[in-house]
Image (cartoon, grey):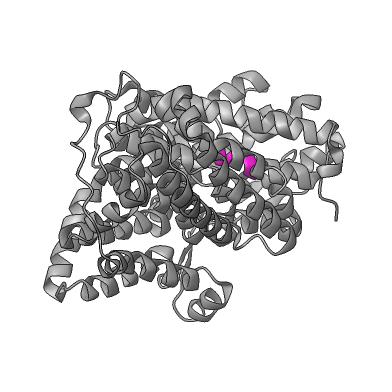
C-alpha cells in the first residue's frame, strides 16, 4: 500500500511548481509549434512519470501501470469515438452526402457569422448533448471546413462554441460523475449549473462571432445572435431546474436551431459577410480553401444527407440511456483490476478526511461505448448510402491510418491524466487553489478549468476535484452545491484548450501539425471566459446568495 504525498518538499510553493511541470511541459511544447502533438504528449508523459517517481515518491511499477491504464482508457472510450465519427464523416464525403448537407445548411444563409451560430454553436451543442467526448468539434469542424472556412476558423471557433453545453454533455455524464464523488443529488448539482451557465450561453454566441468578425461583424447580426443565445439559455435553465440534467443539451440545442432558422426566414442582415478567414496573422489566405458555390438542394436530397446523422442521433440517444447500458453491460463487459495498482494507493488528508483506496480498473464495456454506437450507426448509414462490406472495411482501414497520430496523442494525454490523478500530483495543484481563502469561489472555479485542461474532460475534472471542492467549501463556510457546480461550470471553459480537443479539431479539419497555432488562438479566450465564470461564482457566493440551490 502506498499513500499519496502532496507536499514532497515540505514547501507548498516548491511542491506546486513540481506538480505543474508535466502540464507546463505539454503546453509549452505544443504552443511552440515546433514539436508535433503526439511527440509532445509522449514527452510530457515521460516527464510526468519522472516527477511522480522521483519527486512524489510513487513506486515505479505503479507509475508505469497507471500510465498503461491511461493509454487504454484514452483509446476506449475517447479515441474510439474520434475514430468512428471520422469514419462516418469520410463515408459521407465519398458519397457526396456531406456536400449536400453543407449546401443544405449553407442554403439557410450564406452569411458566415450566421453559419457559425447555426453550426458551431447550436448544432454542436446537440452533438455535445448526445455523445460529447470530442464528437461536436469533429462534426462541426468538418462541416465548416467543407463550407469554405479556413482551417483555423473551423477548428478554433468550433472549440470556443463548444463550451456552454459541455457541463451537460453526453446525456449529463459530467453531472453524474460529480454526484458520484460528492454524494450530492445530481438534480441539485444540475440545477445549480443551470443557474450559472445560461448567462454564458448568452455570451458565447456573441463571443464566437466577435472572435471571427470583430465588433463590426457582431453589430451586423446581433439580433440573430441574441435569438440564438436566448433560445438556448432559457431552455437550459428550465430543463436543468425543472426536469432533469440528462437531456438539457438535447432540448436546448433543438429549440435554439429551430428558433434561429425560423428567425432567418423573416430577417437577414443588411450586408452579407462572405469571408471565411479569421482576422489574425495565423490565418493566412493561403491556408483557406476556395469557397464552394451553394447548390440548390431538393427536399429528398436534404433528407438523404441528413439520414446518416439522424441515425447517429437515434442510436446515441439509445446508447446514452441508463436502461440500455445496464441491459448490455450485464454481459458485454470485461472488468480488469490492474494488478499491484488497484486499491494499492490511498488518498489521505487533507484531500479526504479518512484514507480512501484508489480504484484502478479498466472497464471494457465494449458494446455500450459511445464509439461502438457510432460504429454501428456508421455501418448502417454506409449500407444505406450504397457501400458494400469490402468497401466499408477498406475505408475503415484508411481512417485508422489517417487518425493514427491523433489516437496516439489522445492515449498519451489520458495516460498523463490518469498518472497525475493516481500519483496525487493533481491533488497538489488543487491544494494550491484551496489556500486562497475568501477568494476561493474564484480560484475554485479556475480549478475546474485546470482539471479539464489537464484531462480533456469535464467529467474527469469533476471526479478529480469534486470531493476537494466539497471539503474545502465546507471548511470555508461556502455551499458545497455551489462549488461543486462551479467546478463543472468553470471546467467547460477549459475544454477549448485541452490537447485532446485540439487534436480532434486538427484531425477533423485535416490541419495536421498546426495544433500549436490552434492552441495559441483559443488559449486567451479560454482564460478570459473562465475568469468571467469565476467572478460570477464569487457574486453568487457573497452577493446573490438567493441563486444558490438548497437541498
Does 140 lie within the magenta span? no
Which quadrant of the figure has residue 386?
A: bottom left
Query: Residue at 29% across / 31% down in the picture?
Result: 275
Q: Is residue 111 above or below residue 399?
A: above
Does 491 lie within the magenta span? yes
Query: Residue at 27% across / 42% down in the picture?
Result: 145
Determine whether, in the image, residue 43 is placed left or right of residue 428.
left
The magenta span reads 488-493
Query: x and y percent of residue 42 in the render?
Result: 33, 37
Toward the viewer: 209 or 406?
209
Query: x and y percent of residue 8 in the render?
Result: 62, 28
Toward the viewer: 439 or 86?
86
Query: x and y percent of residue 546 in the render?
Result: 86, 42
Which quadrant of the figure has residue 159?
A: top left
Query: Residue at 18% across / 59% down in the picture?
Result: 96
Q: Main secondary structure of the magenta part?
A: helix
Q: Is residue 427 visible?
A: no
Amino acid at each position: 500500500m502506498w499513500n499519496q504525498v502532496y507536499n514532497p518538499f515540505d514547501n507548498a510553493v516548491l511542491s506546486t511548481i513540481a506538480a505543474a511541470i508535466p502540464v507546463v511541459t505539454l503546453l509549452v511544447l505544443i504552443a511552440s509549434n515546433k514539436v508535433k502533438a503526439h511527440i509532445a504528449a509522449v514527452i510530457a508523459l515521460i516527464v510526468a512519470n519522472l516527477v511522480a517517481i522521483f519527486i512524489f515518491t510513487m513506486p515505479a511499477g505503479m507509475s508505469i501501470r497507471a500510465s498503461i491504464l491511461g493509454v487504454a482508457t484514452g483509446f476506449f472510450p475517447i479515441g474510439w469515438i474520434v475514430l468512428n465519427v471520422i469514419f462516418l464523416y469520410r463515408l459521407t464525403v465519398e458519397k457526396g452526402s456531406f456536400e449536400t448537407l453543407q449546401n443544405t445548411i449553407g442554403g439557410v444563409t450564406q452569411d458566415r457569422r450566421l453559419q457559425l451560430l447555426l453550426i458551431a454553436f447550436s448544432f454542436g451543442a446537440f452533438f455535445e448533448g448526445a455523445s460529447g467526448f470530442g464528437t461536436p468539434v469533429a462534426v462541426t469542424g468538418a462541416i465548416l471546413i467543407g463550407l469554405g472556412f479556413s482551417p483555423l476558423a473551423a477548428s478554433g471557433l468550433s472549440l470556443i462554441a463548444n463550451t456552454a453545453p459541455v457541463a451537460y454533455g453526453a446525456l449529463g455524464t459530467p453531472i453524474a460523475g460529480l454526484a458520484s464523488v460528492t454524494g450530492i443529488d445530481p438534480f441539485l448539482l444540475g440545477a445549480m449549473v443551470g443557474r450559472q451557465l445560461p448567462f454564458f450561453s448568452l455570451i458565447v454566441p456573441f463571443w464566437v462571432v466577435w472572435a471571427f468578425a470583430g465588433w463590426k461583424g457582431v453589430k451586423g447580426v446581433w439580433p440573430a445572435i441574441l435569438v440564438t443565445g436566448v433560445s438556448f439559455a432559457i431552455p437550459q435553465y428550465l430543463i436543468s431546474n425543472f426536469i432533469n440534467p440528462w437531456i438539457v443539451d438535447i432540448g436546448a440545442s433543438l429549440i435554439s436551431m429551430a428558433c434561429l432558422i425560423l428567425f432567418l426566414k423573416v430577417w437577414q442582415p443588411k450586408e452579407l459577410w462572405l469571408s471565411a478567414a479569421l482576422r489574425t496573422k495565423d490565418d493566412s489566405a493561403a491556408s483557406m480553401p476556395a469557397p464552394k458555390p451553394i447548390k440548390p438542394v431538393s427536399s429528398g436530397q436534404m433528407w438523404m444527407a441528413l439520414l446518416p446523422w439522424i441515425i447517429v442521433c437515434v442510436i446515441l440517444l439509445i446508447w446514452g440511456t441508463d436502461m440500455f447500458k445496464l441491459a448490455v453491460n450485464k454481459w458485454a463487459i470485461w472488468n480488469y483490476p490492474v494488478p499491484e495498482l488497484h486499491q494499492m494507493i490511498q488518498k489521505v488528508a487533507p484531500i479526504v478526511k479518512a484514507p480512501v483506496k484508489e480504484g484502478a480498473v479498466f472497464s471494457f464495456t465494449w458494446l455500450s461505448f459511445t464509439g461502438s454506437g457510432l460504429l454501428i450507426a456508421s455501418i448502417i448509414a454506409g449500407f444505406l448510402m450504397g457501400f458494400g462490406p469490402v468497401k466499408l472495411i477498406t475505408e475503415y482501414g484508411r481512417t485508422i491510418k489517417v487518425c493514427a497520430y491523433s489516437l496516439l496523442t489522445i492515449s498519451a494525454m489520458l495516460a498523463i491524466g490518469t498518472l497525475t490523478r493516481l500519483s496525487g500530483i493533481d491533488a497538489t495543484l488543487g491544494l494550491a487553489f484551496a489556500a486562497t481563502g475568501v477568494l476561493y469561489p474564484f480560484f475554485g472555479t479556475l480549478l475546474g478549468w485546470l482539471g479539464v485542461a489537464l484531462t480533456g474532460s469535464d467529467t474527469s475534472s469533476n471526479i478529480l476535484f469534486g470531493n476537494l471542492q466539497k471539503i474545502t467549501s465546507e471548511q470555508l463556510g461556502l455551499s458545497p452545491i455551489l462549488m461543486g457546480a462551479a467546478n463543472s461550470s468553470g471546467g467547460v471553459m477549459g475544454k477549448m484548450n485541452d490537447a485532446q480537443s485540439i487534436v480532434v479539431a486538427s484531425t477533423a479539419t485535416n490541419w495536421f501539425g498546426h495544433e500549436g497555432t490552434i492552441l495559441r488562438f483559443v488559449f486567451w479566450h479560454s482564460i478570459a471566459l473562465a475568469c468571467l465564470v469565476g467572478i460570477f461564482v464569487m457574486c453568487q457566493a457573497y452577493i446573490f446568495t438567493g441563486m444558490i440551490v438548497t437541498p
